[in-house]
Structure formats: C-alpha cells, structure tokens
Image (cartoon, grey):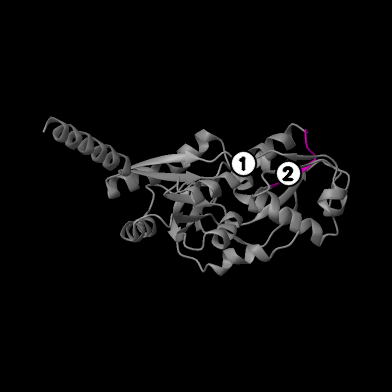
C-alpha cells in the first residue's frame, strides 16, 4: 500500500513538472544583431504573447543561422523568427513546419514594411566607385546562411562578372550586420554587405560617409514559423495574435506588426544561384 502511494506521488510530481515545463513556449531567433539588441527588439512582442497565451515565452538566440534550423528539426524550438533564405531551405527539409506570418519593420519614417533589400557598400571616400572595383579588395559578409549578408551579395557580384571566391581580396565573415558598418568605419575591410535597415538606422552624418554600390531586389522579411509538433489549435491562436499585434510605438527598425505573404516569395530564394 505504501509503495502504491509512493508511486502515485512520484507520478503526480512528474506530471506536475511536465505541465510546468509545457507552460513555456520556446521562441528561437537568428543572431543577426547583438544579444542586447535582439532582446530589446522582441521584448514587446514576447510580453504581448505571454499575456495573451498565459504562458512564459523563452527567447533562444541560435549560435549561428544554420543552428536555428537544427534546433527546429530537433524539436527544441516551438516558434521562431527565421531569415528568408533559411525559411526557403526549411520548407524543403521540413515541409510540415507551419508558416505563421511575415514580420513588418518600421522604416525611418515609421512606415511598416514587410520587405527589405541587400546593400553592397563602401566608404564614400574609397577609391571603390563601382562593383568592378571590388576585385582584389577585402570584403565583409555576415553569415553563409544570411539572405542579405551573403546570398544576394554573391548573386549581385556574379551579375557584375565578379566571382567572389576568386576575385575578391581577403574575405571576412563578421556574423552580425552592424559589425560590417563598424569594420568599414575602422577600415579593417574595404567593402561589405548588409540589409538596408542597418544603413537607414544610422545617423545622417554616418550615412553620408557611405557609398552604396549595389541594391538587391525586394526580399520578404523574416518568417514567423511554428514547429510541426505544436498543437494545431495553438498554432492558429499564435497566428491570430501575430496578425493582431500592434506595438505601442512603431519606431524605426522596430517590429511594426505582421502580415501574411505568398510563400512563393520565399521559395524563389532557392532558385537564386551563385
């Protein structure tokens, strides 16, 4: 009798611990900015989701871009904000992953935008005046799985008869977009690639110190996705909450809301060859 009572208590404790753990919603994001910047960027959204879902939302920043896909495949992530190219890859590898919505960011006029562009840039006083001048010059990319910091810059270079693996000078992988700007100003690289939001967030006097060499076509912003393991009713609820989200104040480079976009805009990224 005592053994049965003991086992019942153990079972109740295990169920209680499991239920407590399930109250947490794990939210994964790419490491495209510093940890502090990422925490600030998602703070209001996380508070909103926690209040509406009555669940704790735990922010997890992946080690690198590709690591986020690994976490999703392992089932370690419930929802995620994933870069466009990675989402295109994920749709091929994990087609049952749920698309929730596409992030909108506020531009410098606080207008909501769900697309952005990749920029190749150098300093305004640099002898690099055009794309052809990049040959032999040191260059900064972000991450091999970055859409605007790697995929499109390579594509734009090939469009201008530049093979980045052969024609560039020393190549630096700087991981985060703001580090490209920092490296340019420190003159540790001669040119680099970023997404346009980083450029537009700079003070005007710093923008004037930069020369833009190339601009990509429009790219859909990061996709919000949910794990295939997540309860379908919860997936629907989170999608509804995202589409209803409005920040208290849409400041430049902050999350301004969400919208649904055609998925072929992401699938298109798998057709870009470089």
Counting residues from the N terminus, which is met first, the one under dot 1 or under dot 2? 1
For label 1, the residue is: 202
Relative depth, front residue between 245 and 54: 54
How far is the residue under mark 1 from the one under mark 2?
A: 10 Å
Q: Does the magenta segment cover residue 152?
A: no
Image spot of residue 21 (x, y percent): 32, 40
Q: Is residue 180 above or below residue 265?
A: above
Using the image, determine if residue 81 lies above or below residue 178: below
Q: Position of residue 132 (x, y in %)?
A: 87, 53
Contact, CB < 8 Å: mark 1 with mark 2?
yes
Among the 4 quarters of the image, the one containing residue 163: bottom right
Which residue lies at the image location 57% right of the left edge and 69% below the top edge? 264
Q: Which mark is residue 223?
A: none
Q: Residue 1, image x and y in percent? A: 11, 33
Under circle 2, the secondary element is strand
The magenta stretch spans which residues?
Answer: 188-193
Residue at (20% x, 35% y) in the render: 7
Closer to us: 254 or 27: 27
| Residue 62 placement: quadrant | top right
Q: Which residue is mark 2?
A: 210
Q: Horizontally, is 190 left or right of 103 in the view?
A: right
Which residue occupies 15% across, 36% down? 4
Q: Report the number of discs.
A: 2
Q: Residue at x 73, y 44 (%)?
A: 210
């Amino acid at each position: 009798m005592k053994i049965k009572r003991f086992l019942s208590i153990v079972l109740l404790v295990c169920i209680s611990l499991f239920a407590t753990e399930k109250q947490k919603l794990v939210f994964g994001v790419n490491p495209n900015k510093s940890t502090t910047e990422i925490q600030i960027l998602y703070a209001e959204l996380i508070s909103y989701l926690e209040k509406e879902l009555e669940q704790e939302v735990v922010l997890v920043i992946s080690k690198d871009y590709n690591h986020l896909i690994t976490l999703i495949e392992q089932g370690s992530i419930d929802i995620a904000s994933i870069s466009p190219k990675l989402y295109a890859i994920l749709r091929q590898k994990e087609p049952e992953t749920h698309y929730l919505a596409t992030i909108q960011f506020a531009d410098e006029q606080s207008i909501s935008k769900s697309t952005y562009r990749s920029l190749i840039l150098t300093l305004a006083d640099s002898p690099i005046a055009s794309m052809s001048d990049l040959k032999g010059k040191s260059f900064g990319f972000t991450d091999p799985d970055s859409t605007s910091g790697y995929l499109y810059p390579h594509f734009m270079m090939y469009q201008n008869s530049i093979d980045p693996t052969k024609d560039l000078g020393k190549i630096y992988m700087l991981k985060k977009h703001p580090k490209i700007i920092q490296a340019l100003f420190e003159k540790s690289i001669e040119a680099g690639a970023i997404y346009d939001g980083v450029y537009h967030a700079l003070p005007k006097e710093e923008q004037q110190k930069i020369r833009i060499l190339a601009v990509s076509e429009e790219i859909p912003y990061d996709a919000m996705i949910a794990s295939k393991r997540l309860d379908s009713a919860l997936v629907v609820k989170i999608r509804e909450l995202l589409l209803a989200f409005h920040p208290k104040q849409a400041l430049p480079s902050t999350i301004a809301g969400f919208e649904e976009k055609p998925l072929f805009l992401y699938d298109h990224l798998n057709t870009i060859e470089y």
